[in-house]
């Protein structure tokens, strides 16, 4: 089981790092949740996982300051770092929500099958 | 049950992330770190040296710190490939907008707001014509076709190699992807320029005037040809065959649209203006010719122009290209230089369709067939809207406000402008210059010329229909259409001059010649004030230098004040109410400088005067404004308008102007500086404030050589260039924006600070890459 967890975590980082489409991000997270259904991670634990990936990407890729300023202005945000926070939340939720859904569907499916 | 509820809730949250709401992108992908805006990188942050391989193309592009490429290529096709690659890298979204607009596909990218545009342009069937054009070029000019093909391959090479981080910001916002480039797409650029510079609804607007006003007012304020004080080529007869104002007969078109857009009423404020001039060797300090050009367009980000230097075994050219095409549009080679201003010829005819039955109509005495088809317009949400098209051999039939019009427009026809620009790149004298232009049809331009032998010239080139004697403007039935145009002029008959005695030639969108015996050339020409001020300056200079040319580009003298102000001062000199303002105006030198108060009062007064004439003399605000120069001239030469005296008219206008200024800036007149009143915005093409240049105070007016169409300026000099035809040639340029179309790029608007000061930087026109001094990035194409 530990190997599976490592594989899932690696897959998530890989998908996020290689800038694939958002649909693939959602599907991967969903599949991860389904694979780790026995661990029954809460949404908050998945957010934690998303946050780790986000920090990793932030450090490895960096942020274009001009982009940050322009888009903060566009959304009327008082501080450009608020945009990083919003992006952080969305990125983490993009993993947490489908992953938790995957877990729940798997549990529901297996429970129904057992019954 | 609890699990079901949780799952439903999670599903709902995910749906919120993947659904676009009220014009916003899908927030999940847009804000996600790995797929959204945080990934955006502009190409300047990429590798300092990049290697590409594509077929047999061989070229290298050396980009300087402003992002200007110097392309050294083994063939013209290789250079075109590299230019296509760079255009795509720097201006992909802009290219997509242009091609989508003219192929009636814009709503699919930007949404329903573009549907009216698509629904209009689809009638001209430019997509079909573009394919036909490419086919024609392939057969007749394989070398140009090879360049178009290579350019397209370059664009697609970039698109195919794009990572998410390369996707322009606008695509992230619109949740869209660029389309594959097609080799016929350069055709759309020609149509886009023709649309912008030549497509007017003047017939409709004038017919509305003819229907609304009594004959004497039409004759006075909407004459066939305005009296003119400075034509472009006065040598060809400034007073030749002056015709009296053409009085208008009874309306022949009853069904003119009842509505006119507020913007269209003020057409006089909307006319684009550009300047170009050349000084011959005998009038310059160096003995060599000097050419100057500043083209005025709507100021946008990205800028319309893309500066480029290309050297191949066949050519060595420097100038401004426009993304979408593989040619230099204005610039210079080792022998000649050329520049453009818009000719403002009236080439659009609207006629009410005289149907004989549902499939035919009368065109003169002839019965012509109508071909019907249904075209699909694609919307952003995937929906499709059907539009019924009626095509004829003369042009499309378009329904506007309930009336069917046949729209005959020279600009819609297929010309061969790319042959012109291909030949211009290698032309070496006036004769080859004219030969290149013989293929140019629309939009008609005043082409100015200078060469390294000290010669200068100018020709207004384009396809000019010959109007019959007694021609009248407005909307007619197609039964009268046959007589509207009686052929087109040969190039030799077009207005042109070579090496004029006075040693200079200048154009500023005014009428080319006063009154041609054989053609009518439009009625929305620019007032002659800019042209006159430029010519006055050039007459005064005996040993011209590039610095003199720059001073003329920066000239902010408004000569309309020289006409209007003496009349104002005379009429109201004894009115105590305006004493302070009039004293200020009396001391003023007509300089539209941003730190002065007088230009604020004058400009607002002029506008209020025009409004007063519309309200009190024409008594109609639902028609297009008379040409500005006519309005000013009529005020200068008449001391009354019916029962209204000029004094009362001027008092009312000044009173209204001062009232507006007090409301806007408060009662302290000393704070009404022109810079507070007259401000410039350079907006992003999607009008996104964060991608736009913040509004700033600016000098100039619609009538000054340093043009700034205010008071809320959104159009002006899109570029400036001075080319000194020495050996080697020295040239200075600048554009109102930057090389890159990527908002996050350091080169997106970094030329604006210099542009604001009317400054120029010297370009590097060198024959060998080793002589380049400012290279920051290199792209090699080939093994």
Image (cartoon, coloured by chain):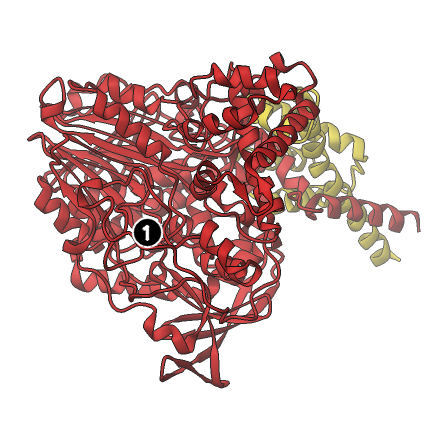
Residue B230 lies left or right of residue B492; in this view the side is: right
Residue B273 lies left or right of residue B334; in this view the side is: right
Task: Tell me the residue at 55%/33% (across/down).
Answer: A17
Residue nearest the viewer, comparing B64 with B450: B450
Task: Tell me the residue at 27%/58% (across/down).
Answer: B519
Residue B780: percent from left, percent from top: 25, 32
Residue B552: percent from left, percent from top: 30, 23
Residue B611: percent from left, percent from top: 59, 40
Against B224, residue B30 (above or below) is above
Residue nearest the viewer, comparing A102 with B304: B304
Q: Colour of chain B?
A: red
Q: Colour of chain A?
A: yellow
**Is residue B597 in sight in this rendering?**
no
Q: The residue tagged with tag 1: helix, strand or loop?
A: loop
* Residue situated furthest bottom in the rendering: B357
- Which residue is label 1 attached to? B443
Q: Quadrant of the C terminus of chain B?
A: top left
Residue nearest the viewer, comparing B608 with B509: B608
Q: Chain of mark 1?
A: B
Residue B284: percent from left, percent from top: 14, 21
**Is residue B1 in sight in this rendering?**
yes
């Amino acid at each position: 089981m530990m190997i599976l967890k490592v594989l899932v975590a690696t897959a998530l980082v890989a998908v996020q790092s290689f800038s694939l489409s958002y649909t693939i991000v959602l599907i991967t997270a969903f599949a991860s949740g389904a694979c780790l259904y026995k661990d029954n991670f809460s949404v908050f634990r998945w957010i934690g996982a998303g946050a780790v990936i986000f920090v990793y990407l932030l450090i490895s890729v960096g942020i274009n300051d001009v982009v940050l300023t322009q888009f903060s202005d566009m959304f009327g945000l008082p501080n450009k770092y608020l945009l990083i926070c919003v992006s952080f939340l969305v990125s983490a939720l993009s993993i947490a929500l489908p992953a938790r859904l995957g877990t729940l569907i798997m549990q529901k499916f297996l429970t129904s099958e057992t019954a | 049950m609890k699990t079901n509820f949780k799952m439903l809730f999670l599903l709902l949250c995910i749906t919120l992330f993947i659904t676009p709401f009220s014009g916003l992108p899908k927030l999940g992908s847009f804000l996600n770190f790995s797929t959204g805006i945080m990934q955006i990188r502009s190409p300047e942050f990429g590798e300092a040296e990049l290697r590409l391989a594509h077929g047999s193309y061989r070229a290298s592009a050396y980009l300087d710190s402003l992002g200007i490429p110097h392309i050294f290529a083994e063939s013209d096709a290789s250079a075109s490939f590299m230019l296509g690659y760079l255009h795509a890298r720097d201006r992909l979204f802009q290219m997509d907008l242009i091609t989508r607009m003219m192929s009636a596909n814009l709503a699919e990218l930007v949404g329903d707001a573009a549907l009216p545009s698509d629904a209009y342009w689809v009638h001209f069937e430019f997509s079909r014509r573009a394919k036909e054009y490419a086919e024609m070029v392939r057969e007749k000019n394989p070398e140009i076709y090879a360049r178009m093909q290579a350019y397209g391959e370059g664009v697609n090479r970039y698109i195919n190699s794009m990572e998410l981080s390369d996707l322009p910001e606008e695509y992230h916002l619109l949740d869209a992807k660029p389309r594959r480039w097609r080799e016929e797409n350069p055709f759309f650029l020609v149509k886009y320029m023709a649309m912008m510079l030549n497509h007017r609804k003047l017939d409709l607007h004038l017919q509305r005037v003819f229907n609304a006003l009594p004959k004497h007012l039409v004759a006075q304020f909407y004459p066939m040809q305005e009296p003119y004080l400075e034509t472009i080529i006065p040598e060809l007869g400034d007073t030749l065959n002056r015709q009296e104002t053409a009085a208008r007969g009874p309306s022949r078109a009853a069904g003119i649209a009842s509505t006119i857009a507020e913007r269209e009423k003020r057409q006089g404020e909307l006319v684009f203006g550009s300047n170009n001039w050349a000084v011959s060797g005998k009038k310059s300090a160096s003995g060599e010719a000097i050419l100057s050009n500043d083209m005025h367009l709507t100021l946008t980000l990205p800028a319309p122009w893309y500066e480029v230097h290309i050297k191949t075994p066949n050519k060595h050219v420097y100038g401004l290209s426009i993304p979408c095409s593989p040619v230099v549009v204005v610039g210079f080679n080792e022998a000649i230089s050329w520049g453009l201003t818009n000719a403002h010829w009236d080439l659009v005819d609207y006629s009410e369709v005289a149907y004989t039955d549902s499939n035919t109509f009368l065109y003169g005495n002839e019965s012509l067939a109508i071909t019907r088809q249904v075209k699909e317009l694609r919307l952003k949400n995937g929906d499709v809207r059907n539009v019924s098209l009626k095509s004829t051999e003369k042009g499309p039939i378009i329904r506007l406000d309930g009336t069917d019009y046949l729209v005959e427009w020279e600009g819609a026809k297929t010309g061969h402008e790319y042959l012109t620009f291909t030949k211009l790149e290698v032309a070496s004298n006036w004769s080859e210059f004219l030969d290149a232009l013989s293929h140019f049809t629309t939009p008609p331009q005043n082409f100015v010329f200078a060469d390294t032998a000290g010669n200068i010239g100018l020709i207004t080139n384009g396809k000019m229909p010959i109007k019959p004697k007694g021609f009248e403007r407005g909307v007619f039935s197609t039964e009268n259409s046959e007589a509207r145009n009686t052929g087109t002029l040969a190039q030799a008959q077009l207005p042109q001059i070579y090496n004029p005695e006075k040693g200079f030639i200048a154009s500023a969108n005014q009428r080319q010649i006063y009154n041609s015996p054989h053609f009518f050339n439009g009625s929305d020409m620019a007032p002659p004030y800019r042209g006159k001020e430029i010519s006055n300056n050039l007459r005064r200079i005996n040993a011209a230098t590039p610095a003199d040319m720059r001073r003329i580009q920066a000239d902010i003298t408004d000569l309309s004040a020289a006409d209007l102000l003496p009349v104002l001062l005379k009429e109201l000199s004894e009115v105590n109410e305006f004493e302070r303002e009039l004293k200020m105006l009396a001391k003023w030198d007509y300089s539209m400088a941003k730190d002065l108060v007088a230009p604020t009062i004058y400009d607002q007064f002029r506008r209020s005067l025009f409004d007063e004439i519309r309200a009190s003399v024409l008594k109609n605000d639902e028609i297009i404004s008379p040409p500005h120069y006519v309005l000013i001239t009529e005020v200068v030469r008449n001391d009354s308008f019916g029962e209204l005296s000029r004094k009362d008219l001027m008092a009312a206008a000044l009173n209204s102007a001062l009232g507006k200024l007090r409301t806007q800036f408060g009662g302290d007149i000393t704070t009404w500086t022109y810079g507070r009143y007259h401000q410039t915005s350079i907006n992003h093409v999607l009008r996104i404030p964060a991608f736009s240049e913040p509004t700033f105070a600016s000098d100039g007016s619609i009538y000054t050589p340093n043009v700034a169409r205010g008071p809320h300026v959104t159009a002006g000099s899109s570029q400036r260039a001075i080319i000194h035809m020495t050996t080697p040639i020295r040239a200075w340029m600048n554009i109102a924006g930057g090389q890159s179309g990527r908002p996050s790029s350091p080169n997106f608007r970094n030329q604006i600070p210099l542009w604001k000061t009317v400054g120029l930087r010297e370009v590097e026109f060198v024959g060998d890459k080793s002589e380049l001094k400012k290279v920051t990035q290199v792209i090699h194409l080939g093994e």
